Image (spheres, rainbow, N blue to C red):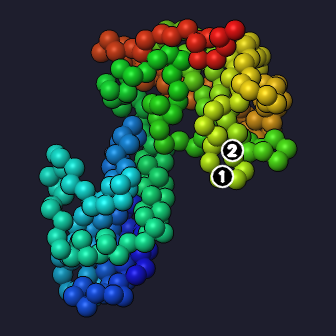
């Protein structure tokens, strides 16, 4: 079986099945993903149209849970019908690589929707705001975004950025949390190597808290980060401004994030 997904959300891909005699062999595939930039539903809807059929009757419509790698029928989605035997037969043939392709397509579509979001018109979901603690992680609110990463020597690093969530405050404080990528697994190490409080307007580190032995200093990491992202202060400023805008709107609903002591995240000594 070969699954080719459309390049853009509204285009068509194809699915060729080699196995089942009862299943038409070739389909046009339409894949769609929920456009909400805050939602992490991890679902994708596929509609399959038999290739060469005269009308555009949908042969299969199914909603897939990409986390559990199975057909799912989320409650409240009335446009998702119960999976047909044909849908079950097809998904049973999906290989790991097919699920990975679907996952890649889901992420790409979410990034695309996030990119096109008009931040003046959307509201942070109440659930996300309830959990939010200031400083708020950019990823905690806007989960699909092009992250910040860089190389230092032979190591690959990724950064999480947390911002002051007071919408009336004009500071340029960001807590940067540095994670090293594990060379063996290619995954991010579970524990961060260093926290620092950084003022992206002045470029000054005001607090620094390395974890464990042998972490490069905040200055070294920041130098490497600036090499990878020359307009770092602009980039961080844009991310902060976007969150502030969202928080300012949330204030009207009185669900601003609770404050935590900045040091609580990093320095305890
Ligand atoms: Zn969703
Ligand atoms: Zn502030």
Which picture quadrant has residue 263?
Answer: top right
The image position of residue 193, as x and y in percent, is: 71, 30
The image position of residue 72, as x and y in percent, is: 25, 56
Which picture quadrant has residue 9?
Answer: bottom left
Q: Residue at x 65, y 11 (%)?
A: 268
Question: Circle 2 — which element?
Answer: loop
Would you place residue 217 above or below residue 150 in this image? Answer: above
**Residue that numbered label 2 is attached to:** 181
Label 2 Cα neighbours within 10 Å, binned few <14 / some 14-19 / many ≥20: some
- Residue farthest bottom in this picture: 21
- Quadrant of the snapshot with the C terminus: top right
Residue 201 visible to the viewer: no
Residue 20 visible to the viewer: yes
Q: Earlier in the sequence, mark 1 or mark 2?
A: 2
The image position of residue 197, as x and y in percent, is: 68, 17
In-front residue for pair 211/105: 211
The image position of residue 210, as x and y in percent, is: 74, 23
């Amino acid at each position: 079986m070969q699954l080719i997904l459309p390049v853009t959300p509204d285009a068509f891909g194809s699915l060729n099945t080699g196995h089942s005699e009862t299943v038409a062999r070739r389909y046009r595939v339409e894949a769609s993903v929920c456009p909400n930039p805050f939602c992490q539903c991890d679902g994708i809807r596929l509609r399959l149209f038999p290739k060469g059929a005269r009308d555009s009757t949908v042969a299969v419509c199914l909603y897939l849970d990409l986390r559990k790698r199975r057909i799912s029928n989320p409650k409240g989605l009335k446009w998702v019908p119960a999976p047909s035997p044909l849908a079950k037969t097809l998904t049973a043939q999906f290989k790991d690589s097919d699920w990975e392709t679907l996952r890649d397509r889901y992420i790409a579509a979410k990034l695309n929707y996030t990119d096109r979001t008009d931040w003046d018109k959307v509201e942070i979901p109440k659930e996300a705001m309830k959990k939010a603690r200031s400083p708020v992680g950019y990823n905690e609110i806007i989960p699909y975004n092009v992250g910040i990463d860089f190389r230092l020597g032979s190591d690959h690093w990724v950064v999480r950025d947390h911002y002051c969530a007071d919408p009336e405050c004009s500071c340029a404080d960001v807590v940067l949390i540095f994670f090293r990528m594990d060379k063996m697994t290619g995954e991010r190490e579970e524990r961060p190597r260093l926290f620092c409080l950084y003022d992206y307007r002045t470029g000054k580190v005001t607090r620094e808290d390395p974890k464990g032995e042998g972490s490069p200093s905040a200055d070294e990491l920041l130098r490497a980060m600036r090499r990878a992202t020359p307009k770092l202060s602009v980039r961080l400023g844009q991310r902060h401004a976007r969150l502030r805008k969202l928080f300012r709107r949330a204030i009207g609903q009185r669900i601003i994030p609770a404050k935590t002591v900045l040091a609580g995240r990093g320095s305890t000594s």
